[in-house]
Image: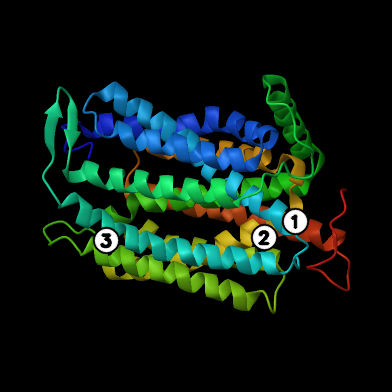
Amino acid sequence: LYAAYGYTHDEIAALFVAGFGSSMIFGTFVGSLADSMGRKRGALLYVATYALSCVTKHWKTYWVLMVGRILGGVATSLLFSVFESWLVSEHERRGFEPSSLGTIFANAQSGNSIVAILAGVAGEWASNLRPLRPVAAGVMVGGYATPFDLAALVLCVGGLIVAATWTENYGGAAAASLTLSSSLDAFRLGLADLAADPRILLIGLVSAAFEAAMYAFVFEWTPALTVRAAPPPPYGEIFSVMMLCCTCGTRVFGIAQRYMATERTMHALILLSAAALTVPAVLAGFNPLLCLLAFLLFEIAVGVYFPAVATLKSRLVPDTRRSTIYNLFRVPLNVLVLVVLLARMTSRVIFTTSVLLLAAAAAMQHRLCKLLAISHHPDDPEQAPLQRP
């Protein structure tokens, strides 16, 4: 869409930097606000914020698009914190078996992968309904702007479902007053939790390193599969196969849960991811077939990762400040992604950096496994309550 509006590569990159930067700066405090005002309200705030971001795509004016990216960054922080926080708290409040939470996360990630495929098909269909054209000064409709209208419609339907069916929760805390002071208190206490419990800090750093490598993969997989003087590969079909591999990964997680502790599963998948991305670090742009196979293996690992990390975070992070801490986890992630976006590295250098990030994540996950082994009850390593060190 931005290219269709005539913006250069550097101008488009600046828009993406604004999105990740706003997620890092504003999103952290919005997470604290969600713990104070309630996770249901936080989810509805996400719907409103992202819908507004979609609306800005109709403006060709650069500063309006920049505002849209900033709103999108805030919405992304809410997306990756309030929904999961609400689920974990509600799951506990209703007295469901703790072991079923991992299954719920696995099914959710499987559903996300399937929806991603359907969304790609629907977006392609919507963008071809009518050509992109101006209807007023700087205001465009049709073409690549139409999928954002479809997204806003789906968001509003989801918001109505949340408003009609969800109960409000504030984690383990009572309803707090919606003030700047309460949000700052939640932010301060979230930082104190990270300083007091090395296991919370470690899972946050592991998730930041892994997801930074994942975002780098998202930016660079198409150049890695493109060979000069050769016809472009079928990117749409490749993306669909990748999402299917991600869905398979969620099933792998379900099987692994029967035989391994979640933290051990995490350690194995991180090592597998590092091995997979070593291939494009060496062969990007030279051997697209081997790179593709490595990418499919990485997507399977991603499918295992999301339910595994969500399960571990649900056990380690205190519920009263869950949204706050989840957004604090995203600060180093956004910093790493911004470095990748701004450094102008080649694909092979970016993949090499990703492998180093995954190696660091594996080392930190190994340390976390040791700490969890100390705090677990020896007879029931998955279900015993974790004690603060």
Residue at 45% in and 34% down: 49
**Residue type pointed to by label 1:** Arg
Q: Amino acid at mark 3?
A: Val
* Residue placed most toward the observer, 115 or 367: 115
Q: Is residue 150 left or right of residue 101?
A: left
Local secondary structure at mark 3: helix
One can see residue 331 in this view: yes
- Depth check, mark 2 against mark 3: the one in front is 3
Cα gap from disc 2 to disc 3, whole angstroms:
31 Å
Answer with left or right where residue 282 lies relative to residue 139.
right
Could you say which quadrant of the image residue 237 lies in? bottom left
Local packing at callout 2 (Cα closer than 10 Å; few below 14, some 14-19, many 20+) is: many
| Residue located farthest toward the front when viewing the structure as drawn | 164
Q: Label 1: which residue?
A: 315
63 or 277, nearer to the observer? 63
Q: Nearer the viewer, residue 239 or 178?
A: 178
Residue at 13% across / 30% down in the picture?
Answer: 135
Where residue 311 sits in the image (x, y, percent)?
A: 67, 60
Which residue is label 2 attached to? 311
The quadrant of the rendering that contains the N terminus is: top left
- What label does residue 121 carry, if any? 3
Count of numbered badges drawn on the protein: 3
**Residue 271 in sight from this viewpoint:** no
Check contact, mark 2 vs mark 1: CB within 8 A: yes
CA–CA distance in space, label 3 to label 1 = 37 Å
Quick one: SS at disc 2?
helix
